[in-house]
Amino acid sequence: MLPFVLYFVTAMFTGYHLYALMSLVVYGVPVNLLELVGLLGAFALLIAAYISLFRPRAAGRVALIACLALWCFYAPAIANFVRARIHKPAAVSELRSLKATALWTGASPIKGF
Amino acid sequence: MILVYSAIVLLILATAYSTVVSFRHKPEDAQPSWLFPERPKRPARIIVGFVTLVLVIAVGAWIKLNVANPNTQNSALHSYRFLIPEGYTGWVRIEFEIPGAPALPIQSSHTMVKIPPSGTLKTSSSEQYGAASDDYASYSNDTVRPLPDSGPEKRVWGKITGELQGPGGNRKYEEFFVGSEQQFKSQTLPPKPKE
């Protein structure tokens, strides 16, 4: 059951995170194509979880492809996040940083939401 | 942030695990371990299938009860219909939660916001938040004409939602400019609210 649990929980966490980010579209935030690719990866990982109940090795391959799709979003996002943290030039960047954090966490910087 | 960190940690684990499972050469006589177990037994698969089915039904029921059914939706959330005096040009301001002021009426799923000729409306109603498509119209004695808020004939600009802290408590307001693009650009800043 380990592969099922691992793939399932990962799909749920990443899927919910990407869904939260994409739901900001109602507030005018444009959808990034990489978010769509990542969401597709989360869905594929969910499928891999169920395949693992029957064919663990085949599920591993599907899960690997799904993870690569997810990394298409997470790798640049992590790189940008780390770069923003390291090269934090001045206090003026606080607002930008706050906005980036809000987008990163799926929260909205807009009052009332 | 804990969701993001958890997602990344799980993704790293899932990537590493699926890579090893995909590429490792399993010897013929290899015993199943906790890390690379055999496929689950039939009862375990049935339990997983049953739990999934229950989960799908529960989510479907939740969506039907809370999202799809208009009777259970937040009845307070209506899109605004702003009625602006014919020929009005300038900033329009709506001040919310003003004690003693009239409440905003609701007509056919729209919250009607009739702006007086002064351009400032005070209401006791609360400001609504959420996704909704507001529309704008100009009114004269008998006629109501739609006021475009997009496209080349756009007449509504610079919508602002704000909150001021003052001695009388917090004041929530909404402002936008009515006029041509040129008029808006020549008068970008809204007038300062009076305390």
Image: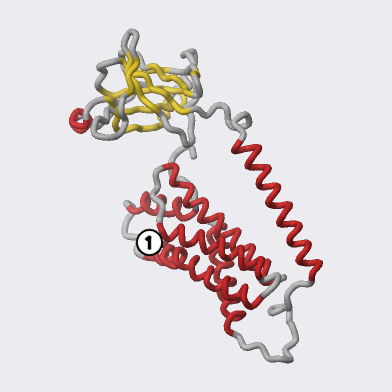
Q: Position of residue B155 (x, y in %)?
A: 27, 28
Residue that badge 1 annotates: A84
Residue found at x 33% / y 8%:
B141
Q: Secondary structure at mark 1?
A: helix
Which amino acid type is shown beneath numbered disc 1?
Ala
Q: Residue at x 62, y 88 (%)?
A: B25
Q: Is residue B52 above or below residue B61?
A: below
Q: Quadrant of the N terminus of chain A?
A: bottom right
Tell me the quarter of the picture where residue A2 sits: bottom right
Question: How is the structure coloured here?
Answer: secondary structure
Which percent across, then down, holds residue B146? 33, 22
Q: Is residue B137 left or right of residue B48?
A: left
Query: How many numbered marks, from 0 up?
Result: 1
Using residue B60 as the reference point, say whether residue B91 is left or right of it.
left
Residue at x 35%, y 60% (from the top left corner)? A88
In which quadrant of the rendered view does residue B70 lie? top right
x and y, in percent, of residue B42 in the image: 79, 69
The chain containing the residue under callout 1 comes to A
Splitting the image into 4 quarters, where does residue A57 fall? bottom right
